[in-house]
Image (cartoon, rainbow, N blue to C red):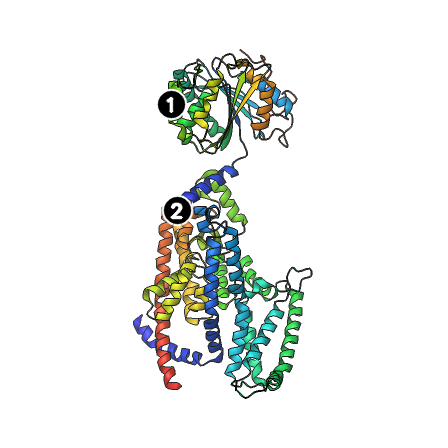
Amino acid sequence: MSNLMKRLLPMLVTNSVRLRHNRIYRALQQTFAVIFPFVIVGAWAQMLEQSVFSRNGFFAVIYNLDNVIPHYNQIRTLLLIVETVTINMMSVMAAFFVAKYMARSYKKDDSLAGLTSVGAFLILNFNAQRNAQSSFQTNNFGYRGLFIAIVFGLLIGWVFRFTHADFEEPSHHYTIAGLISRGLRGTWLTILILIGSVAITYGLSRVSTEGFIGLFYVVFQMPATNIPHVSLRLALVTTINALMWWTGIEGPINPLMVQAGSTTSTANLNYALEHANLFNVPNPITINTIYHPFASFGGVGMTLALIIATLWVGRSKPLRRIAGLSLLPGLVNISLPVMIGWPVTLNPILLVPFLTTPLVNMAIAWTAIRLRLMPPSVYTIPTTTPGPLAAFLGTNGNLVALIVAVICLIVSVLIYAPFIRLAETINLESAKVGDHHD
Amino acid sequence: MFPATKWMAQNVKSARVVHNSRMQPIILIPGSSATEDRFNSLITQLNHQTSGHSLLKITVKTNGKLTYSGKIAARDTEPYIVVAFEDNKDGYNNIKKQAAWFNIAFKQLTKTYSFNRFRGIGHSNGGLIFTLFLEKYYSEYDVQMTRLMTIGTPYNLEESNPNNRTQMLNDFITSRDKLPNTLTVYSIAGTENLDGDGTVPIESVEAGKYIFQNQVAHYTQITVSGDEAGHSELPQNRQIVNLISQYMVATPNQQGVRPGQGGSGRGVGPAPRDGTQNP
């Protein structure tokens, strides 16, 4: 292993140094850094709102908090406002900053590029449906729309290289008229981009009512229907879902969303309620029995394991700090801080464990259920239930399920740990090499 | 972690109750010296007012064997089940025995019909048997008693002075914390004269408050006077029949229930007439 690493490392370092000099990579890094404080504030608000101040939040149901905490609903409203202007606006912010940093890398007018990108992003998420309640598909302003924001932001920032709107350091010798006329230099491009966005939106509305996200989901559904074997189908579906999350698209499988009762899980639940014996439920292997309770601690991709592994083996202080800030939200399955902060999103090194850990965990859970060591977990639990407890509660207190969940967590941490070391080594090495270059 | 487990167990239990709530029988226990036919006229009257429910009658022999008459109609969600005892003598010792016999019958009933909720009506000592059952045997079951109506039940036996507590009342009060806190209790007292229903002193019925009040979810005491307010007439008293159909029968007009064949023409099951099946 270490020999392999020694041979691999220089190659990885050279590649990541090259990557670091890539404008796209830099624009993304800078953008994530700028929006991270908003993500943290929003995620903590979301954590409180979902686990404490929602009537079916984990802590709320256990301690009956809605009767205990005074002004329960008012506090919830305040938290929702904070969420709305932070994480639920994340993609709008990203659209601005990605275009801004991209344009700046070409020494062009970055503010104009940023604002144009925001305009284009808003147009792309315009609600084309008639009688729509809101002008925009506001649910795409959060993590769900991040990939689109990034792609179009980069594109718009890049297009600005062809303008004459050069970036100028603000000087003390300016006139207001001069400033305004300077702003006009890129206007033709802005107009073209906005018109282009309108055309794209119009075209999209003919094929998908949900914009780009609707298109992605259509792609997602294709493998699900064609594979007959349930375990393979589960593996493929969850992996594609994880890949979407990694890319910056909120995949259709979201641990924070209440699972609509599928036919299989309803059959399981009915059986369990009638017979009180979970071992013989009709569908022992489903997404609700092996993926949700065992393979999505902290969110898609077992990011809770990444947080724990970072706190365990991580040496870099900033990374440890980010992991520390992400730990509590991660416990109630809110993964945004670590997705943006580490970052996991579009990070090539973390892609491997992000995709493999859930598969390994599902295999462990599958084996334990097939060997009848533990019953499948079939009862509905709050979405904010801390990951390691999900199986324990979902089986109504089966100790083996708890042990299997803990094993899954340990295995996941062990899978993530070497990649964290690898990422840190590459960071250090490329920083050294980078210094020489600059 | 522990409160989470507790909450989950509770959650699953209530989900199970809701899920399996299709049948919720009304179990009736007659008083001393009364047979399984004690409630025939009551149920005839009830079925006359509503679209009717079927009736199953069980007598528990002294050796614990059960004899049945009548039956529960296939789709009936709220049948009446009368449980009577071969040895139906009065006295605290006999009541204890009868509660144990009732437990045998109840175990068999939950096994056969797998219901998760039931309501109970006890006339006279029948109310004492229910109370004893709740305090002594109920916790063994995963079954919920939602309502109990006792009619002319002497919680302090024949004693009219509430300060002279009988051994039985003392025992009931000692174990009252075993009573389910989700239960709703109605205690009905008949008053023929100012002292009571002629057999049971009103104070003895009222002594029920020492057992139920502040322990069960709701405890309501109702006093009925006027015609037919004598102790043995209470189950046929029109006021009380109205109270029963109002408080105890959840689905007086069950949808999809058709008058059964060979029955009374009303209701799913044969509505018994007084005397027709008496031995």
Q: Chain of mark 1?
A: B
Relative vertical location of residue B38 with respect to residue A295 in this rendering, above or below: above
Q: Which structural element holds mark 2?
A: loop
Residue at the (64%, 75%) spot, across then down: A194
Residue A419 is at least partly visible in this image:
no
Residue at the (55%, 17%) spot, across then down: B234
Residue A180 is at least partly visible in this image:
yes
Badge count: 2
Q: Using the image as rendered, state which of residue A345 and residue B150 is in the foreground.
A: B150
- Structural crowding at the residue carrying mark 1, measured as other residues with C-alpha within 10 Å and reported as few (<14), some (14–19) or many (≥20): some
Residues at circles 1 and 2 in contact by the CB criterion of under 8 Å: no
Mark 2 lies on residue? A372
Give the x, y percent position of residue A297.
Answer: 42, 57
Q: Using the image as rendered, state which of residue A338 and residue A234 is in the foreground.
A: A338
Mark 1 lies on residue? B171
Q: Using the image as rendered, state which of residue B4 and residue A168 is in the foreground.
A: A168
Give the x, y percent position of residue A165.
Answer: 58, 85
Q: Which structural element holds mark 1?
A: helix
Residue A367's mark?
A: none
Rendered image quadrant of residue A324: bottom left
- Structural crowding at the residue carrying mark 2, measured as other residues with C-alpha within 10 Å and reported as few (<14), some (14–19) or many (≥20): few
Q: Amino acid at mark 2?
A: Arg
Q: Amino acid at mark 1?
A: Asp
- For the residues labelled 1 and 2, the Cα–Cα distance comes to 47 Å
Rendered image quadrant of residue B261: top right
Q: Residue furthest left?
A: A2
Q: Chain of mark 2?
A: A
Relative vertical location of residue A305 with respect to residue B229 in this rendering, above or below: below
Q: Residue furthest bottom?
A: A173
Q: Using the image as rendered, state which of residue A3 and residue B215 is in the foreground.
A: B215
